[in-house]
Amino acid sequence: MDSVVFWRRLEGVGVFLVALHSFAIGIMLMCTTAWVLQFAGWDEVSHLFFPRQSGAFHIILAAGYYWEFKRHQTIRLMLLAKATAVVFLLIMSPWKEAWSVPFSGVFDGLMLVGMAFIHRMARR
């Protein structure tokens, strides 16, 4: 198999997995909000509206990632969203928040770097 073909297939799988991850997080935030927040390390949340809204945005981003890639073979939205998430999660006082905040920042960073690398290799 040609190297570029391998990287392009891997890119498609990566986009699908990142989109699936965002979609699953979105569904969990919308449907099992209190449980997800407790699991993530918040002992008390007085209002569930904004975490649920975050879930809706995760679903929209997941659709955007997949749609952009299928239509244009680009991942700009994903790279922008992941870079923004990394900065927000790792700079906005993560060590004072729940354990899941820095964990999510690092995990989003790994997705960002991995997908940027794969995309570059697929476009050689």
Image (cartoon, grey):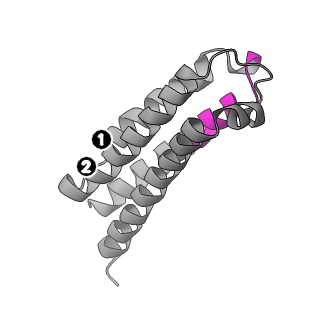
Give the label on residue 76, or none. 1
- The amino acid marked with disc number 1 is Arg
Going 61% across and 22% down the picture, which residue do you hit? 48
What residue sits 54% from the left and 21% below the top?
Answer: 49
- The kind of secondary structure element at disc 2 is helix
Q: Quadrant of residue 28?
A: top right
**Which quadrant is the C terminus positioned in?**
bottom left
The location of residue 96, given as percent across then percent down, is 75, 16
Quarter of the image with the N terminus is bottom left
Residue at 44 percent of width and 34 percent of height: 56
Q: Amino acid at mark 2?
A: Glu
Left or right? Give the position of 75 relative to 28.
left
Is residue 71 depicted above or below 86 in this figure?
below
The answer to whether the residue labelled 1 contacts the one labelled 2, judged by CB atoms less than 8 Å apart, is yes
The answer to whether 52 is drawn above or below residue 27 in the figure is above
- Residue 44 quadrant: top right
Residue furthest to the bottom: 1
Give the mark nearest the N terminus, 1 or 2. 2
Main SS, magenta region, reads helix
Report x, y in % for residue 22: 49, 45
